[in-house]
Image: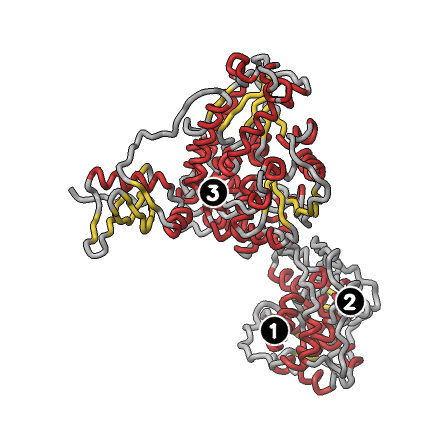
């Protein structure tokens, strides 16, 4: 993993970029932090923020021209935030006298300040704090310049004098009633390391660099009106501060311009969207100043502008309270750790890899790609926690084992001859399709492992429909069947070794079957085939339904309104989006779209194996999507349905609308347990082989048991939460009984047994009642318990 390239991606993220008010403020007051403190009623902290950025904050805060208000994004939705009035409130309620600090030794150099106006006094105080011996020359009889023009009830004479006492306290040399002209300036240039001119006007035109405030190549610098700040109060003090930085660098003989691109006003890349911003009118003060309550109310109008389009739609980044740039820094840190705890592992494995973040980002930053590459890197370096994806990978292994996986061509005419008699052959499209069989497979129906586990009852009917429809429409080639798992769990887990092995088997079958088109009923399968098998032609079952007509079903108009949830794996598959909508409408339903649908759809919480790695995070996704639904939901992904129903929402699979005998029950169908999912897949294979191919196969009964297992509901819930299968419990108890390896508690009459299978140790506490074994509790872990001989 190229970590330097990764950091470059993180640098693209504009989440940390300042809002336009901050960027437009010449001294960059942190407006959002300032507003936040006011909202909390902490005016002292708010004042500290002003004091940190604004020179002579007690004075400037009352007379600032506030360019931030001109650009405020709230201005067209109730009026700009009244920062000027809020600053006055904060000064009145939160001002605290500055703490006495020990002055730095004044040994860095000598600087002359010509002009004691706004820019001059700012530069003088800043340079004094940096350790320079500063001398101020002012042509009038007092410092402050334009400050005195604002003397009023708002800015009292006593306040100005009090703030300017800093020159006396800091022992800054001040020479009043002394005008400096060009000839005197030339004399001073030899006496001082640097000179700052802040006089407002000058007898000769000065060639001033507007970035460094340097005059030509000399040791003279200039600010304020001379530097083009006009009448702006805050612009003048900013120029004084920035010139002081340049002087310090000049005297110190370091680069004057390095890393100063964002001093003063600059254009922020943050373009806050106000499309959905509600209008809230500004708070009008009832007196000369805001009251605390009025100020807090005005502060609450602030939009706190920050780019978080990806965050506001992502339950994952919300749960971890993280932005893409910070996320990438965490990944970088975790990847560089050789020894120690990798705190980011849980977070990395809690992303569904749905890709919505990229859709929301105008810079196309894809955390899906970043996290996927990170998982692969973690696996490669041995940093991926085994527990995160182990169960899902074993489930994939089961689906590709002989217990479920199978490949069959369309039944031959010889196998199907019992269907070729009148009247079956006259009305059964399936029988007609078999009769027209050629022996060459043109299509291979690949229902996927999850649909086969959740809705195994539909698979046979779909296959019969396909055989009949494809032949009726005179499409070349028979329709075969392929049961298995596409490998999505391995892809999500970053296990490219398993992924390539799985894809290799799929491609081998494809070649052996003479390169048929795969008919896919699973959204994840469609995504995986597109990513790893671009050479294989695929078509979704939904496109076939849409193009060639639905299976025979009762269709009535005005059957109701449904919220249609698009599977995130189809984000870039508009053909599926269109087909599903056409099918739904043809069945008599009205679709009410989610705010986030099609290419901007959200995830159900199963993607990325988050359901296994972080169940709480998965539930966040489920509840987020359900909360947006006002009607019963419609999906076309088996796991989407299972999770939404598990979350308490009536949800239909598109196949329910076509095949379900009891539609009401179908919408609330209990999610199969992990054990039931295995059983359903295995039983589906047996049923299909028997009913369609006339082959007899029975469930694996190699391990005959001499007991009946009873698992109460509470124990079954533990099994589901802890990823323990019915067969795992059977093996533990059978091993304990046959080998007398258990602990027995004579007081409770309970047995405690364990068995290590592959990389997991299972523990079962149970009791016996004749041949009945009742399970009380179950547990599993990955530690290996080594017993002494």
Q: CA distance from mark 1 to mark 2?
A: 22 Å
Asked if labels 1 and 3 touch by Cβ distance under 8 angstroms, the answer is: no
Q: Nearer the viewer, mark 3 or mark 1?
A: 3
Q: Disc 3 or disc 2, which is closer to the eye?
A: 3
- Mark 1 lies on a secondary structure that is loop
Residue receiving disc 1: 40
The reply to whether callout 3 and callout 2 are in contact (CB within 8 Å) is no
| Label 3: which secondary element | loop
Q: Earlier in the sequence, mark 1 or mark 2?
A: 1
Which quadrant of the view contains residue 18?
bottom right
Q: Is residue 662 left or right of residue 764?
A: right
Identify which residue is drawn at 68% across, 55% down.
Answer: 261
Farthest-out residue, left: 789
Residue drawn at (74%, 73%) of the image: 84
Say if 201 sits above or below 442 in the image.
below
Residue 581 picture quarter: top right
What residue is disc 2 on?
78
Left or right, residue 422 beside residue 684:
right
Measure how far apart labels 3 and 1 are at the Cα level: 49 Å
Residue 753 percent across, percent down from the top left: 25, 45
């Amino acid at each position: 993993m190229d970590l330097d390239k990764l950091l470059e991606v993180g640098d693209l993220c504009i989440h940390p970029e300042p809002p336009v008010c901050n960027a437009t403020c010449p001294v960059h007051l942190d407006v959002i932090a300032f507003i936040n403190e006011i909202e909390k009623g902490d005016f002292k902290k708010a004042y500290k923020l002003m004091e940190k950025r604004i020179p002579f904050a007690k004075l400037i805060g009352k007379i600032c021209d506030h360019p931030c208000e001109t650009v405020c994004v709230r201005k067209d939705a109730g009026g700009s935030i009244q920062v000027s009035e809020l600053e006055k409130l904060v000064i009145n309620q939160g001002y605290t006298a500055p703490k006495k600090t020990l002055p730095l030794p004044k040994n860095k150099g000598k600087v002359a300040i010509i002009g004691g106006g706004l820019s001059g006094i700012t530069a003088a105080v800043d340079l004094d704090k940096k350790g320079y011996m500063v001398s101020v020359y002012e042509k009038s009889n007092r410092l402050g310049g334009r400050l005195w023009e604002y003397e009023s009830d708002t800015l009292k004479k006593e306040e100005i004098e009090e703030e300017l006492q800093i020159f006396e306290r800091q022992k800054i040399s001040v020479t009043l009633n002394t005008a400096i002209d060009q000839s005197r300036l030339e004399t001073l240039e030899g006496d001082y390391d640097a000179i700052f001119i802040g006089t407002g006007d000058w007898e000769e035109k000065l060639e001033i660099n507007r970035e460094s405030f340097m005059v030509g190549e000399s040791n003279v610098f200039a600010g304020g009106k001379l530097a083009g700040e006009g009448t702006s109060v805050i612009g003048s003090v900013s120029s004084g501060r920035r010139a002081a930085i340049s002087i310090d660098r000049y005297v110190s003989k370091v680069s004057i311009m390095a890393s100063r691109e964002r001093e003063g006003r600059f254009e922020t890349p943050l373009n806050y969207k106000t499309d959905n911003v509600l209008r809230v009118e500004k708070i009008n003060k009832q007196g000369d100043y805001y009251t605390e309550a009025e100020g807090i109310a005005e502060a609450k109008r602030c939009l706190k502008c920050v780019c978080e389009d990806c965050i506001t739609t992502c339950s994952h980044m919300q749960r971890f309270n993280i932005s893409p740039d910070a996320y990438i820094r965490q990944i970088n840190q975790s990847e560089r750790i050789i020894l120690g705890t990798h705190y980011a592992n849980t977070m990395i494995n809690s992303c569904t890899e749905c890709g919505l973040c990229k859709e929301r980002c105008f810079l196309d930053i894809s955390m899906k790609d970043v996290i996927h590459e990170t998982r692969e890197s973690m696996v490669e370096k041995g940093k991926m926690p085994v527990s995160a994806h182990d169960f899902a990978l074993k489930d994939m292994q089961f689906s590709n084992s002989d217990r479920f996986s199978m490949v069959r061509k369309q039944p031959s005419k010889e196998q199907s001859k019992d269907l070729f008699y009148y009247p079956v052959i006259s009305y059964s499209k399936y029988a007609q399709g078999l009769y027209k069989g050629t022996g060459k497979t043109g299509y291979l129906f690949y229902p996927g492992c999850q649909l086969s586990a959740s809705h195994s009852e539909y698979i046979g009917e779909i296959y019969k429909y396909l055989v009949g429809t494809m032949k009726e429409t005179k499409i070349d080639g028979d329709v075969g069947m392929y049961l298995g798992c596409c490998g999505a769990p391995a892809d999500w887990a970053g296990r490219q070794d398993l992924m390539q092995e799985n894809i290799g088997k799929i491609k081998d079958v494809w070649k052996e079957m003479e390169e048929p088109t795969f008919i896919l009923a699973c959204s994840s399968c469609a995504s995986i085939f597109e990513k790893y098998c671009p050479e294989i032609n695929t078509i979704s079952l939904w496109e076939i339904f849409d193009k060639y007509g639905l299976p025979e079903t009762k269709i009535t108009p005005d059957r109701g309104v449904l919220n249609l949830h698009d599977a995130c794996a189809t984000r870039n598959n508009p053909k599926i989006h269109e087909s599903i909508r056409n099918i739904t409408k043809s069945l008599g339903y009205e679709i009410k779209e989610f705010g986030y649908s099609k290419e901007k759809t959200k995830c159900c919480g199963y993607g990325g194996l988050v359901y296994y790695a972080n169940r709480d995070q998965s539930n966040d996704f489920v509840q987020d999507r359900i909360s947006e639904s006002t009607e019963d939901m419609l999906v076309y992904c088996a796991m989407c349905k299972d999770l939404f129903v598990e979350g308490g929402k009536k949800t239909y699979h598109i196949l329910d609308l076509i095949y379900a005998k009891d539609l009401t029950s179908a919408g609330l169908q209990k999610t199969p347990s992990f054990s039931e999912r295995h059983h359903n897949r295995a039983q589906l294979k047996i049923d299909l082989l028997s009913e369609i191919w006339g082959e007899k196969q029975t469930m694996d009964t190699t391990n005959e048991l001499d007991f009946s297992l009873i698992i109460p509901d509470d124990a079954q819930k533990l099994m589901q939460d802890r990823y323990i299968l019915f067969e795992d419990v059977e093996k533990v108890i059978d091993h304990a009984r046959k080998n007398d390896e258990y602990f027995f508690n004579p007081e409770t009459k309970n047995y405690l047994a364990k068995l290590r299978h592959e990389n997991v140790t299972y523990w079962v506490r149970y009791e016996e009642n004749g041949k009945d074994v009742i399970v009380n509790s179950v547990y599993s872990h990955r530690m290996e318990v080594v017993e002494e001989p």
